[in-house]
Amino acid sequence: MLTMATRRRRRRLVVLVALMLVVVVAIVVKLVVLNDDVHRVTPEEALERYRDGTSTTATATGDTEPTTTDTAATVQQTLPAPGVYVYATRGKESIDAVGGSLHEYPAETTITVTANGCGVSLQWDALKERRERWQLCLGEEGITLTAEGGQSFHEFFGQTRAEDITCDRDVVVVPVGGEPREPVALSCMLGELSWQPVWEVLESDTRLVDEVFVDVVHVRMTISDNDTYYEHIQFDWYLDDHGLPVSTTLLKESLSDTAFGDVRYLEEYTLDVTSLTPLR
């Protein structure tokens, strides 16, 4: 006959085995069913894609002579030359769903510039699972970030989220003359959600690139959404005279309603261009 102590030990053993099975199942689900591997996009891969996807002709780029005119004098502005720019990178993104996941960004990432529409498209590839795209054109007041042509792409656990960015108007990011400009609030859509960024042109500055000081304009985008599903972003661009990001920093925190339930997302990164001469 089993003693009371023996029965208690057996019950504890059964509970322990059950807990271990739950842990094992959770690990298998996360690693196999919800595989969250990430993949680097090397400069060589970005260059191959650029060569495959671009023609030999370029319009409104650093190789041409588009101009914009100031009331006092004629000032020439050109957009970034097409090609693949390499950036020293420090950064990561994470979510707290399904036990959490962290994507570390590689030490080198790329921004690919291609001729597109009225100007150029710029795509930052942090990973094959994380990229960002935006569009620059020339306007009467300077280089503008266009109302359409942007996209934000994320992938976690095989679930992709590609959100097009469309706004009610363009916004100047490199003014003719480089003077600071007051904050401009835009009304945008990020995918199917309302998105309200505020852009402002701050001070002029310099950045050291390959042992040469480069003049830059400091541009900042902020979002302060304090709803239940909140979003806080501070995005700082340091753009050269052509609108190429020489240095970039971002801090972001948000809470979203997703297929996994409420998910907290964190992202931070710093990018510094290693050369102003693109790979081609």
Image (cartoon, rainbow, N blue to C red):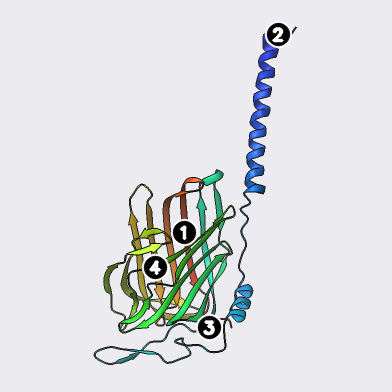
Q: Secondary structure at mark 4?
A: strand
Q: Which residue is mark 4?
A: 166
Badge 3 density bin: few <14, some 14–19, many ≥20, Cα 10 Å: few
Side (left or right) of 73 relative to 46: left
Q: Residue furthest front?
A: 192
Mark 4–mark 2 Cα distance, whole angstroms, equals: 72 Å
Camera-nearest label, 3 or 2: 2
Residue 178: percent from the left, percent from the top? Answer: 31, 80
Residue 193: percent from the left, percent from the top? Answer: 39, 58
> In which image quadrant can residue 220 be found?
bottom left
Q: Secondary structure at mark 2?
A: loop
- Report the residue at 36% width, 60% height from top: 195
Mark 1–mark 3 Cα distance, whole angstroms, equals: 26 Å
Q: Which residue is mark 1?
A: 268
Q: Residue furthest top?
A: 1
Q: Earlier in the sequence, mark 3 or mark 2?
A: 2
Q: Which residue is mark 3?
A: 277
Q: Secondary structure at mark 1?
A: strand
- Tell me which amino acid carries mark 3: Thr
Q: Which residue is mark 2?
A: 3
- Report the residue at 67% width, 48% height from top: 32
Q: Quadrant of the N terminus?
A: top right
> In which image quadrant can residue 39 be found?
bottom right
Q: Earlier in the sequence, mark 1 or mark 3?
A: 1
Mark 4–mark 3 Cα distance, whole angstroms, equals: 30 Å
- Of residues 41 and 159, the one nearer the viewer is 159
133 versus 2 height, above or below: below
- Of residues 13 and 57, the one nearer the viewer is 57
- Tell me which amino acid carries mark 1: Glu
